[in-house]
Amino acid sequence: MAGNGDGDIRVLLVLDLLLSLAFSTVLVWGLSFFELAAFTIRTVLLTALFLAVLTYLLVLR
């Protein structure tokens, strides 16, 4: 079966969210290591949401 190669948008969005969450966890941890940001669930989730939206707007759209 030949497809168009775009993939399912739901899978792309879930991957975007998971990778954004992983990256934001490392990013916020690094910032908290240098005492530039607090390492909290809220900070990680807000950063992940920002990265996911930014990725969606720049790449997936």
Image (cartoon, helix red, strand yellow):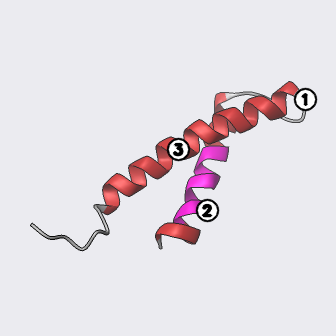
Callout 1: helix, strand or loop? Answer: loop
Above or below, 12 against 34 in this view is: below
In three-dimensional space, the C-alpha distance between marks 1 and 3, rounded to whole angstroms, equals 23 Å
Above or below, 12 against 57 in this view is: above
Percent position of residue 2, x then y: 14, 70
- State yes or no: residue 48 in magenta: yes
Task: Give neighbour class at mark 3: few <14, some 14-19, many 20+ (Cα, 10 Å).
Answer: some
Quarter of the image where the N terminus is located: bottom left
- State yes or no: residue 51 in magenta: yes
- Whether residues under marks 1 and 3 lie with C-beta atoms below 8 angstroms apart, the answer is no
| Label whose residue precedes the other's in the sequence (1 or 3) | 3
Amino acid under label 3?
A: Leu
Foreground mark, 2 or 3, reads 3
Residue that label 2 marks: 54
| Disc on res. 51 | none
- Out of 8 and 46, give the one closest to the viewer: 8
- Magenta: main secondary structure equals helix
- Whether residues under marks 2 and 3 lie with C-beta atoms below 8 angstroms apart, the answer is no
- Whether residues under marks 2 and 1 lie with C-beta atoms below 8 angstroms apart, the answer is no
Residue that label 3 marks: 19
Image point 63% across, 40% down: which residue?
A: 23
Amino acid under label 2?
A: Leu
Above or below, 57 against 40 in this view is: below
Residue that label 1 marks: 34
| Label whose residue precedes the other's in the sequence (2 or 1) | 1
